[in-house]
Image: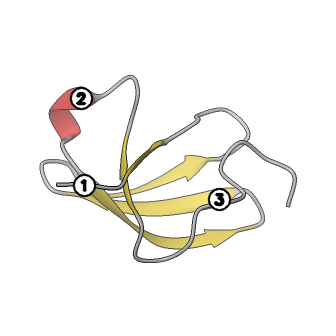
Amino acid sequence: MDHLNAFLEPGMLVKHPDQPDWGLGQVQSNIDGRVTVNFREEGKVVLDGRVVALIPVFEN
């Protein structure tokens, strides 16, 4: 993988840097640069990992 979110794995918690109102999200999958995240306030979103660098969250 050679994109900004290559290290993300299913189950990890993240935030979108440009959409703070989406709240906390949980990574569902990370396949070929497409990261699927289920955000608390926005629902399921598929992002291009080559364009958006998600922010990992290690504490709630």
**Residue nearest the observer in this picture, 59 or 22:** 59
| Colouring | secondary structure
Classify mark 2: helix, strand or loop: helix
Residue 28 drawn above or below residue 32: below
Where residue 1 sits: x, y (%)? 85, 61
Instruction: Determine whether label 2 and label 3 are within 8 Å by CB.
Output: no
Tell me what residue is drawn at x 17 percent, y 55 percent.
60
Front disc: 2 or 1: 1
Q: Quadrant of residue 43?
A: bottom left
Tell me what residue is drawn at x 38 percent, y 22 percent.
18
Q: CA distance from mark 2 to mark 1?
A: 16 Å
Where residue 36 sits: x, y (%)? 48, 63
Q: CA distance from mark 2 to mark 3?
A: 20 Å
Residue 52 drawn above or below residue 43: above
Mark on residue 34? 3
Q: Is residue 51 left or right of residue 60?
A: right
Q: Residue furthest left?
A: 41
Residue, disc 1: 59
Compare marks 2 and 3 and give the one earlier in the sequence: 2
**Residue nearest the observer in this picture, 7 or 2:** 7
Disc 3 residue type (three-letter): Arg
Q: Is residue 57 left or right of residue 36?
A: left
Q: Residue furthest right?
A: 2
Residue, disc 2: 20
Q: Is residue 44 left or right of residue 55?
A: left
Where residue 22 sits: x, y (%)? 21, 40
